[in-house]
Image: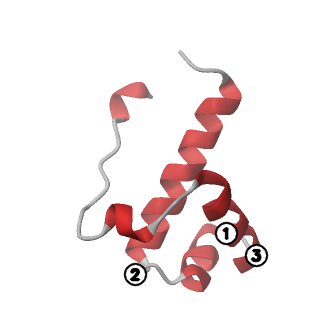
């Protein structure tokens, strides 16, 4: 079991990826959907090392059993 901070970071990362996929990887649209600025989403994408190539053509499925 990870720390609370690790869990929060993982949730945030998953939400950003989901929003990007739903918005066809348009950062401005994904940021609006999440209620954050374009600058913030850019920072978080870099922070979490999120790359479009890693998710091309696949739907992200998250393990909801953790909740």
The residue sitting at 64% across, 38% down in the picture is 8
Dot 2 surroundings within 10 Å: few (below 14), some, or many (20 or more)? few
Alpha carbon of mark 2 to alpha carbon of mark 3: how far? Answer: 18 Å
The type of colouring in the image is secondary structure
* Residue closest to the eye, 33 or 20: 20
| Element marked by disc 3 | helix
Report the residue at 67% width, 26% height from top. 4
Q: Where is residue 60 shown, x and y percent of the image? A: 32, 55
* Residue drawn where x is 23% and y is 70% of the image: 57
Residue under numbered circle 1 = 41
Check contact, mark 2 vs mark 3: CB within 8 A: no
Q: Is residue 59 left or right of residue 7?
A: left
Q: In front here: 58 or 19?
A: 58
Secondary structure of residue under mark 1:
helix
**Residue to which mark 2 is pinned:** 24
Q: Nearer the viewer, residue 48 or 5?
A: 48
In the depicted view, which residue is nearer to us: 22 or 56?
A: 56
Task: Establish if 28 lies above or below 57.
Answer: below
User: Answer yes or no: do the residues labelled 3 and 1 have beta carbons within 8 Å?
Assistant: yes
Q: Are marks 2 and 1 in contact (CB under 8 Å)?
A: no
Figure quadrant of the C terminus: top left
Q: Which mark is residue 7?
A: none
Residue at the image point whose x is 67% and y is 55% from the top? 47
Q: Is residue 8 above or below residue 39?
A: above
Nearer-N-terminus badge (2/1)? 2
Residue 66 x, y percent position in the rendering? 41, 26
Residue holding disc 3: 39
């Amino acid at each position: 079991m990870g720390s609370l901070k690790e869990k929060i970071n993982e949730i945030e990362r998953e939400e950003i990826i989901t929003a990007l996929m739903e918005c066809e990887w348009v950062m401005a649209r994904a940021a609006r959907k999440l209620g954050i600025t374009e600058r913030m989403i850019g920072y978080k994408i870099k922070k979490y090392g999120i790359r479009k190539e890693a998710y091309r053509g696949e739907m992200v499925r998250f393990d909801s059993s953790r909740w």
